[in-house]
Image (tube, rainbow, N blue to C red):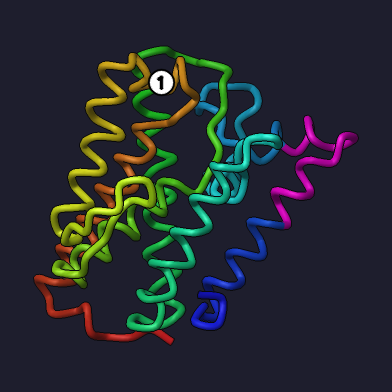
Amino acid sequence: MMNNMTPTVKQLLIINIIFFLGSQIPNIKELAYTSFSLYSFGSPNFRIWQLITHMFMHAPYPSLSHIIFNMFALVSFGSILESLWGSKKFLFFYFSCGLAAAIMNNLVNQYYFGDIVTSAVGASGAIYGLLIAFAFMFPNAELSLMFIPVPVKAKYFVPIYMLLYDGLFGIFGNSFFGINTGIANFAHIGGALMGFVIMWYWKKNSFNNRRWN
């Protein structure tokens, strides 16, 4: 997998690892999470750069599943998409989905809860966009979960996964707003929606085959 990693994906992976390791240093951990995590627009801790930097922050150690899953998905799906699109097009798509995830997360939480003081971290919104893009580009490619090794075509796998993880589990687990679990479901949805809109537009305009190098 590492040998097939494309240059931009490799750079994003390295930046994520640097942010993660740096933010675990005891003397700067609190400052790092306060400065770079995404706070609500009305929070005194909100800074405009958090709309981007939250994508490179992940749940703190000892919780490693958050960053491991996101980076695995980034390398697996991102490298394929970058090889088709070129680096600039891939970066445009990746950051567009991550930014949309941040904005939707903040707007929804602002509407329902006002100026909440909790923060959001992670590249999951951008990753959800990559999943949508992969399903658009390779609808018949077979995917499966590690703990449920049943191959399912991407055009079915991606929406079913999102529906179960962010729909049913979020609603019935009372975690749709991330209150009980810390999972920002609306950030996931925002990233997926932006990914869908961009891919729909590109497909409609026969733009999927054009590279931005």
Q: Main secondary structure of the magenta part?
A: helix
Residue 82 lies in quadrant: bottom left
The vertical placement of 91 against 193, above or below, is below
Q: What residue lies at 53% left-to-right and 32% top-to-bottom?
A: 120
Q: Is residue 58 left or right of residue 22?
A: left
Q: Nearer the viewer, residue 104 or 7?
A: 7
Q: Is residue 32 left or right of residue 77?
A: right
Q: Which residue is mark 1?
A: 110
Q: What residue lies at 38% left-to-right and 67% top-to-bottom?
A: 77
The vertical placement of 71 against 187, above or below, is below
Q: Which quarter of the rendered picture does the C terminus lie within?
A: bottom left
Q: Position of residue 19 (x, y in %)?
A: 70, 51
The vertical placement of 202 against 158, above or below, is below
Residue interval drawn in magenta: 18-32
Q: Nearer the viewer, residue 201 or 191?
A: 191
For the image, the number of numbered tags is: 1
Q: Amino acid at mark 1?
A: Gln
Q: Position of residue 15 (x, y in %)?
A: 66, 61
Residue 133 lies in quadrant: bottom left
**Does dot 1 land on a helix, a strand or a loop?**
helix
